[in-house]
Every structure is written in structure tokens, then in C-alpha cells.
Image (cartoon, grey):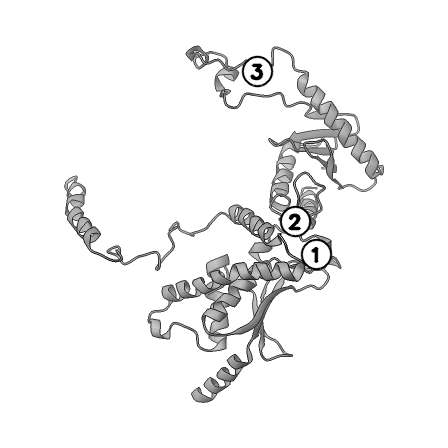
Amino acid sequence: MVVFSLLIINKAGGLVYSREFHAGLAKLSSNDLLILAGTFHGVHAITRSLVPDAVRPVQPSTSISASTSTSGVNSTSAPAFPVRPSGLEVLESSHFRLTCFQTLTGTKFLLLTEPAQPNVDVVLKKIYELYADYVMKNPFYTVEMPIRCQKFDTGLDAFVRVRG
Amino acid sequence: MTQPPSKNPQTALPQQSLRTQSPGLRYPTNKKTIYDRNLNRTRTAELSRASFAYLFVEMISYAQRRVTGVADLEKRLNLQGYPLGLRLLDLLLTRTAPQPSTARPVRVLPLLQFITTTLWKHLFGRPADALERSAANAAEYMISDNEPLVNSYISVPREMSQLNCAAYVAGIIEGVCDGAGFATQGVSAHWANEDPAKDAPAQMWPGKTVFLIRFAPEVLEREEILAKATA
């Protein structure tokens, strides 16, 4: 299993974290990485509005017939949490696969892996857990700012190396 | 089979109403009050580590307001822990000692053992990793913890690398020492590894913390007198 690199984009589209796990990648300058993050943020926003009508969630109706409707999606989606289009999730090429995981607060985790990489969602969930532990519980981190937490770095390295 | 359960509440009811009428403190019949055991009586009596971590984040942010430097911030954290130490000493002594007259440690070593075992187990669920006496100064003792719980999620920024947030625990220790009648000239928390960035992966415990306890001269004087008296 090969994980190439991880990017974290805040909800404003700024790059707050980038880390490479694999030697021999083409070096990107920090400016290029920032442009990449900003571009992806924009593309992601566009893909979120590109939803065919068939998939678009129905407005929650207050009538009782909605709860007895035969369509599984409509009856299970509670009115308080309507299903929203998530936007771009996977981008695949012959050389790499980009998986995007967006948290409820709008932070995006981009993981670049080999195309044949299995269980990417599990890896992303674990990375999200490390982020919640070592970044969000760190009193010296300001939200939405670049992440400089030594324990997050070591935790990520240990996790990816053990999996690899 | 169904009769005893239906009968019990009826017999228990008059007792209960009698107890509520009597003035003063009310004790449960089995004498198990909050002073004897925790309110949380699940098997391990554990609290959520995440909620403590978030609370500690807020405590540090609060202490960080209007501070002038790292030493000032550590002093504020120390002051936050001090009252907790005073109270924990009384609570833990009440719970462990059979007779109150012999409860309080009167010599230095029993006090330090009380801190490293009873207090540490109560706070962190395990004893401290080491207890040493300083070779250079007889008044100084060192308690080391390989991985302090309070620091488990904290990465200190490079410009404040001297800061150790376990100063809060140092404050608790200071409160216990003061409460037991052992005046100190301060308890402080230090990183065991001087430069955390240097050969970091080789170290087994990168977060190892040493709590340095400096007893006041009068404590050592009394210790000598007590040693002569028992010898």
C-alpha cells in the first residue's frame, strides 16, 4: 500500500497542512500547493451544485404521507438533516487516486494514493481521528490556521508507516 | 416469590421519612457517603479523557490571557492546581486511613510515597514512574512521569519550548505538600530531555516530565529532629 501525500484545506479554501509520506515525488513549491488547494476548493464547490434533479433531495414535506412513503431515501432522511450533495469525492488517474473527505464543519482532507489502494475511507477516518486528537485538543492551535503540531506529525507518520 | 419485593418498600419508607426529619447531615444507612467513594461508581470510575482535554485547553487559554512570558504562564497553571491539591489531600486521607490520628504523613518519605502512589493513582490511574532524591541538594526531590496525562494531546510551539503544561500537576503536588505541613519553595515541572527536537525518534519517552520539589529549610530541620527522636 502506498499513500503519497495528505493535504488539509480549511473551510475558506486555504491550505493548512501538507505532508508527503513517499520519497521521490515531484517537488511542489508551497505556492503551488496553495494554488492547488484553492483550485480544488473551487472545483469542489462547483461539483456540489452539479446535482441532477433525480438525486436532488426532496424538500421535506410536513404531511404524514411522507413517513409512509415507499421510497427508502425520502422516509429515512429526517427533516432536520436533509441530505446535501457532498461534491467531488474521488478523482482517479492512471498514476494516482485523490480521495476527498469533508468534515461536517467544512474542512477537507485530501489523500493522494495509488489507484489500487484499498480502504482509503478507513485511512481517512483514522487521520480525521488523529486531527481531532492532536490538533483540535491542542491549546496552542488556532482554528483555521496552518497546523504546526509535532504530535500530529509523529502520529501520522507512525500510522502510515505501520499500515504501509 | 413476589411478596418480599412488594413488602420491602413499605418497611423502608418510615425509616426514610424519619431520617429526613432529623436535623444536620444525613448519612446513608451503609455509611457510604461522597467522602468514602466517588459519585461515579462504575467499575473503573473513569471520566472521559476527551472532555478533560477540552477543559484543559480552556484552562490554558484562560491562563494565557495577560501573561508576560512562559514563567508567568507556568505560575498561573501552578496556582490553578494548588487548591485542588489541598482538597485532594484531605479527601484521600479520609478515604485511606483507618484512624484519623495517624492519617497525615509526618515524615518526608511517607509524604512523597503518598503523592507517587495514592495521589497519582487517584488522578491518573497508575503510580508515578520514579521518585528520586537530588544528589546535589538534599532539600530537592524529583518525581518523574514518562507520559503525563495532561500533556497527552499538547504540542508546545517551538517559540515556547520551555513551557511544560504539567505545571498544573506541579501545583497539585505543591498543594498536597503545603496542606500536609511541608512548606516548599516551589514545585516545578521540567522536560526530562533538554532538547526535544534532537534525536527525537531514538527517545523512548519524548514527553518525560520531572517534577522538582524543593522543601523549605525548616522542613529538613524538623526531619532531622524526628530522625534523632526515633533512632
Q: Are marks 1 and 3 on the same chain?
A: no
Q: Which of the pair A70/A120 is nearer the observer?
A: A70
Amino acid found under the numbered disc labelled 3: Pro
Secondary structure of the residue carrying tag 1 is helix
Q: Which residue is mark 1?
A: B160
Secondary structure of the residue carrying tag 2 is loop
Amino acid found under the numbered disc labelled 1: Met
Numbered tag placed on residue B105 in the rendering: none
The residue located at (75%, 59%) in the rendering is B199
Amino acid found under the numbered disc labelled 2: Phe
In-image side of B224 versus B200 (left or right): left
Q: Which residue is mark 2?
A: A140
Q: Which residue is mark 3?
A: A57
Between the C-alphas of marks 2 and 1, the distance is 10 Å
Above-or-below relation of B57 to B74: above
Q: Are the residues flagged by discs 2 and 1 in contact, CB closer than 8 Å?
A: yes
Q: Quadrant of the image for the C terminus of chain B?
A: bottom left
The residue located at (68%, 44%) in the rendering is A156
Between the C-alphas of marks 3 and 2, the distance is 41 Å
Secondary structure of the residue carrying tag 3 is loop
The residue located at (48%, 16%) in the rendering is A75
The picture quadrant where one finds residue A131 is top right
| Mark whose residue sits in front, 1 or 3 | 1
Q: Is residue A2 visible?
A: no
Above-or-below relation of A19 to B38: above
Q: Are the residues flagged by discs 3 and 2 in contact, CB closer than 8 Å?
A: no
Residue B208 percent coordinates (x, y):
63, 61
Q: Are marks 3 and 2 on the same chain?
A: yes
Q: Quadrant of the image for the N terminus of chain B?
A: top left
